[in-house]
Image (cartoon, grey):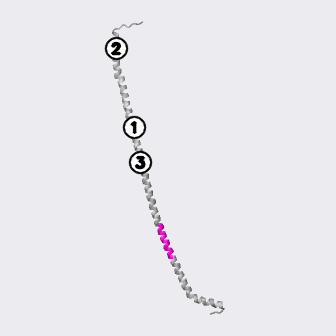
Amino acid sequence: MITVIPDISLVYQMINFLVLLFVLNLVLYKPIRNVLLERKAKIEGMKIGAQKAASDLVAGEDAYKDGLKQARSKGLKEKKTFIEEASKEEKEIIDRINKKAQANLAQIKKQVADETEQARKTLEGEVDAYAKAIGGKILGRAC
């Protein structure tokens, strides 16, 4: 078995260890811990930024959907209004055409009635002459 006799070198080794520990802590461990803490804070900040961006995206998407819904309803209302206006205008045009056709029909009826009356008067004036001519031909004599 080996036995270690404590002497002054043990004290030097302990002091050397403590100095080395202090120097390493100052030079190596603290900067690494600071870098790790900064990285952790940066990652947390990025997580918060990503969460905010996600919530903004959801809000923007909702606003887009609402805007789209409003635009669609407005478009449908305008379409309905245009259809109603076109229907009114179509009725007015058809009514005008019908009135014009009725007026033309009445004019044509009047013209036909006038021509018929004129022909009747003309024929009534010539009935005696035609009757005598027909009677004469039937009886075989000329009048």
Residue placed at 42% from the left, 52% from the top?
A: 71
Image x and y of residue 7, in percent: 34, 8
Q: Amino acid at mark 2?
A: Met
Q: Is residue 121 left or right of residue 19?
A: right
Can you give x and y, in whole percent of width and height, for residue 122 in the image? 55, 85
Q: CA distance from mark 3 to mark 1?
A: 22 Å
Among numbered discs 3 and 1, the one appearing first in the sequence: 1
**Secondary structure type for disc 2:** helix
Residue occupying the point 48% across, 67% down: 94
Q: How many marks?
A: 3
**Dots 2, 3 in contact, CB < 8 A:** no
Secondary structure that dominates the magenta span: helix
Q: Is 64 drawn above or below residue 135 in the view shown?
A: above
**Sequence-wise first label, 2 or 3:** 2
Tag in front: 2 or 1: 1
Q: The N terminus is located in which quarter?
A: top left
Q: Which mark is residue 51?
A: 1
**Mark 2 residue crowding within 10 angstroms, few (<14) / some (14–19) / many (20+):** few
Crowding near pointer 3: few (<14 within 10 Å), some, many (20+)?
Answer: few
